[in-house]
Amino acid sequence: MGERDRLGKGGNVLNMFRTVEDELLKAAIGHLRNRIRKDTRVTVHLRGRKDEVKTFSYIFGTYSSFLHRLITFMLYRCGAFGLDFSPLNDAVARHSVPAENVLCRYGADTMAHLRALFVDAAFIRPDWKKSN
Protein backbone atom coordinates (compact mmCIF):
# COMPACT_ATOMS: atom_id res chain seq x y z
CA MET A 1 0.00 0.00 0.00
CA GLY A 2 1.42 3.37 -1.04
CA GLU A 3 1.59 6.52 1.07
CA ARG A 4 -1.24 8.16 -0.89
CA ASP A 5 -3.44 5.08 -0.42
CA ARG A 6 -2.99 5.34 3.36
CA LEU A 7 -4.30 8.91 3.29
CA GLY A 8 -7.61 7.89 1.83
CA LYS A 9 -9.33 9.60 -1.05
CA GLY A 10 -8.57 13.30 -1.00
CA GLY A 11 -6.65 13.28 2.29
CA ASN A 12 -4.27 16.04 3.36
CA VAL A 13 -1.05 15.34 1.48
CA LEU A 14 1.39 17.79 3.10
CA ASN A 15 3.00 15.21 5.39
CA MET A 16 3.22 12.74 2.52
CA PHE A 17 5.08 15.32 0.42
CA ARG A 18 7.45 15.95 3.32
CA THR A 19 8.01 12.21 3.70
CA VAL A 20 8.87 11.60 0.04
CA GLU A 21 10.61 14.92 -0.64
CA ASP A 22 14.21 13.69 -0.38
CA GLU A 23 13.59 10.46 -2.24
CA LEU A 24 11.19 11.52 -4.99
CA LEU A 25 11.02 15.31 -5.25
CA LYS A 26 14.51 16.60 -4.44
CA ALA A 27 15.82 16.67 -8.03
CA ALA A 28 12.61 18.20 -9.41
CA ILE A 29 12.61 20.86 -6.68
CA GLY A 30 16.26 21.61 -7.51
CA HIS A 31 15.47 22.08 -11.20
CA LEU A 32 12.47 24.23 -10.36
CA ARG A 33 14.53 26.35 -7.94
CA ASN A 34 16.90 27.20 -10.80
CA ARG A 35 13.96 28.46 -12.87
CA ILE A 36 12.43 30.74 -10.22
CA ARG A 37 12.81 34.45 -10.92
CA LYS A 38 15.06 36.18 -8.42
CA ASP A 39 13.81 39.70 -9.24
CA THR A 40 10.22 39.12 -8.13
CA ARG A 41 8.70 38.62 -4.70
CA VAL A 42 5.44 36.77 -4.26
CA THR A 43 3.38 36.48 -1.10
CA VAL A 44 0.49 34.05 -1.03
CA HIS A 45 -2.23 35.37 1.22
CA LEU A 46 -3.87 32.36 2.82
CA ARG A 47 -6.93 33.24 4.78
CA GLY A 48 -9.90 31.90 2.88
CA ARG A 49 -13.08 33.68 1.97
CA LYS A 50 -14.45 33.12 5.49
CA ASP A 51 -11.11 33.38 7.36
CA GLU A 52 -11.07 29.59 7.78
CA VAL A 53 -7.43 29.05 6.73
CA LYS A 54 -5.13 29.20 9.74
CA THR A 55 -2.24 26.96 8.67
CA PHE A 56 -0.26 26.14 5.54
CA SER A 57 -1.25 22.48 5.86
CA TYR A 58 -4.94 23.42 5.47
CA ILE A 59 -4.52 24.01 1.72
CA PHE A 60 -3.26 20.46 1.22
CA GLY A 61 -6.67 18.99 2.02
CA THR A 62 -9.38 18.21 -0.50
CA TYR A 63 -9.74 21.78 -1.74
CA SER A 64 -7.74 21.42 -4.95
CA SER A 65 -6.37 18.77 -7.28
CA PHE A 66 -3.48 16.55 -6.25
CA LEU A 67 -1.31 18.10 -8.96
CA HIS A 68 -2.09 21.63 -7.75
CA ARG A 69 -1.11 20.63 -4.20
CA LEU A 70 2.12 19.04 -5.44
CA ILE A 71 3.12 22.10 -7.47
CA THR A 72 2.28 24.39 -4.54
CA PHE A 73 4.46 22.30 -2.23
CA MET A 74 7.36 22.26 -4.67
CA LEU A 75 7.18 26.01 -5.34
CA TYR A 76 7.06 26.70 -1.61
CA ARG A 77 10.09 24.47 -0.99
CA CYS A 78 11.92 26.40 -3.75
CA GLY A 79 11.27 29.66 -1.96
CA ALA A 80 9.06 30.90 -4.81
CA PHE A 81 6.63 32.55 -2.40
CA GLY A 82 6.12 33.51 1.20
CA LEU A 83 2.97 33.09 3.26
CA ASP A 84 0.74 35.59 5.01
CA PHE A 85 -2.33 34.76 7.10
CA SER A 86 -3.20 38.27 8.27
CA PRO A 87 -6.19 40.25 6.96
CA LEU A 88 -5.69 41.13 3.29
CA ASN A 89 -5.48 44.89 3.84
CA ASP A 90 -2.79 44.38 6.50
CA ALA A 91 -0.81 42.04 4.25
CA VAL A 92 -0.97 44.45 1.31
CA ALA A 93 0.20 47.36 3.48
CA ARG A 94 2.99 45.34 5.17
CA HIS A 95 4.42 44.21 1.83
CA SER A 96 3.87 47.62 0.15
CA VAL A 97 1.98 46.05 -2.73
CA PRO A 98 0.26 48.44 -5.18
CA ALA A 99 -3.46 47.67 -5.42
CA GLU A 100 -3.16 46.77 -9.12
CA ASN A 101 -0.72 43.98 -8.18
CA VAL A 102 -3.10 42.28 -5.75
CA LEU A 103 -4.65 39.18 -7.27
CA CYS A 104 -7.52 37.54 -5.38
CA ARG A 105 -8.76 34.06 -6.15
CA TYR A 106 -11.21 32.06 -4.08
CA GLY A 107 -11.62 29.10 -6.37
CA ALA A 108 -13.02 28.59 -9.81
CA ASP A 109 -16.52 29.55 -10.87
CA THR A 110 -16.96 26.19 -12.54
CA MET A 111 -20.43 26.78 -13.97
CA ALA A 112 -19.47 30.14 -15.51
CA HIS A 113 -16.43 28.58 -17.16
CA LEU A 114 -18.49 25.62 -18.39
CA ARG A 115 -21.21 27.89 -19.81
CA ALA A 116 -18.57 29.91 -21.68
CA LEU A 117 -17.64 26.75 -23.62
CA PHE A 118 -21.08 26.38 -25.20
CA VAL A 119 -22.93 28.47 -27.77
CA ASP A 120 -26.21 27.78 -25.98
CA ALA A 121 -25.64 27.26 -22.27
CA ALA A 122 -29.35 26.64 -21.67
CA PHE A 123 -28.70 22.89 -21.90
CA ILE A 124 -26.39 22.91 -18.87
CA ARG A 125 -28.18 21.80 -15.73
CA PRO A 126 -26.40 22.90 -12.53
CA ASP A 127 -28.43 20.42 -10.47
CA TRP A 128 -27.06 17.42 -12.44
CA LYS A 129 -25.54 14.76 -10.17
CA LYS A 130 -23.12 12.02 -11.07
CA SER A 131 -24.78 8.65 -11.30
CA ASN A 132 -21.72 6.94 -9.76
Image: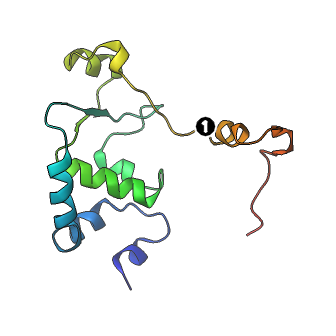
Snapshot quadrant of residue 121: top right
Q: Residue at x 34, y 22 (%)?
A: 88
User: Which of the pair 58/106 is nearer the observer?
Assistant: 106
User: Which of the pair 35/72 is nearer the observer?
Assistant: 35
> Looking at the image, which residue sits at the far bottom?
1
Q: How is the image coloured?
A: rainbow
Q: Residue at x 76, y 42 (%)?
A: 118
Q: Residue at x 38, y 48 (%)?
A: 59
Snapshot quadrant of residue 124: top right
Whole-percent x, y for residue 132 in the image:
73, 70
Whole-percent x, y for residue 101 in the image:
33, 20
Locate residue 23 relative to residue 90 in the image: left or right: left
Q: Which residue is mark 1?
A: 109
Q: Quadrant of the N terminus?
A: bottom left
Three-letter residue code for mark 1: Asp
Instruction: Report how many numbered discs are placed on residues in the image.
Output: 1
Q: Is residue 91 above or below residue 119?
A: above
Q: Is residue 21 above or below residue 73?
A: below
Whole-percent x, y for residue 82 in the image:
21, 37
> Looking at the image, which residue sits at the far right?
123
User: Which of the pair 113/50 is nearer the observer?
Assistant: 113
Q: Residues within 10 Å of mark 1 (few under 14, many from 20)?
A: few
State the SS at label 1. Answer: loop
Q: Residue at x 63, y 42 (%)?
A: 110
Locate residue 41 relative to residue 71 in the image: left or right: left
